[in-house]
Image (cartoon, grey):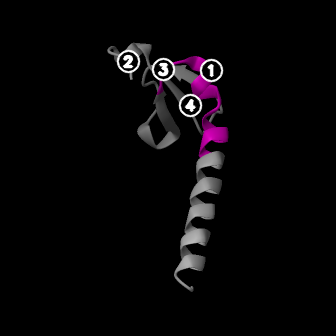
Amino acid sequence: MTEKPEDEFWYNTRTGEVERGKQSIALDRIGPFATEAEAARANERLAENAQRWAAEEAREAEENGY
């Protein structure tokens, strides 16, 4: 995380654009990210996390006999 809010990058889910600082309402933002490149990958990271969590939940359900 950065020390100054204007040095943070956010991904705007409504526009698909990367923003420097908090320019949009919180509902439309993912972040903060330290770099513009990281923010640009926000959707990819969300998809990767969702896949990982789904796999973990499936594994736990299988282990517990559900």
Label 4 vs label 3: CA separation? Answer: 12 Å
Secondary structure state at the residue bearing disc 2: loop
Percent coordinates x, y for residue 66 in the rendering: 57, 85
Q: 36 or 14: which is nearer to us?
A: 36
Mark 3 vs mark 2, CA separation in Å:
6 Å
Of marks 4 and 3, which one's residue comes earlier in the chain? 4
Residue 2, disc? 2
Say which label, 3 or 2, has the lower sequence index: 2
Q: Would you say the residues marked 3 and 2 are in contact, meaning their CB atoms lie under 8 Å apart? A: yes
Q: Which label was assigned to residue 37?
A: 1
Residue type of the residue flagged with mark 4: Tyr
Say which residue label 3 marks.
34
Q: Is the magenta stretch mostly helix, strand or loop?
A: helix
Instruction: Name the front one of labels 4 and 3.
Output: 3
Is 22 in front, or is 56? 56
Question: Per the image, is 45 magenta?
Answer: yes
Badge 4 is on which residue? 11
SS class, disc 1:
helix
Residue 39 in percent (x, y) is at 57, 27
Relative to 54, is 36 above or below? above
Q: Rate crowding at label 4 as few (under 14), some (14 to 19) or many (20 or more) other CA atoms within 10 Å.
A: many
Q: Where residue 47 sits: x, y (%)?
A: 65, 48
Q: Give the range drawn in magenta.
A: 33-46
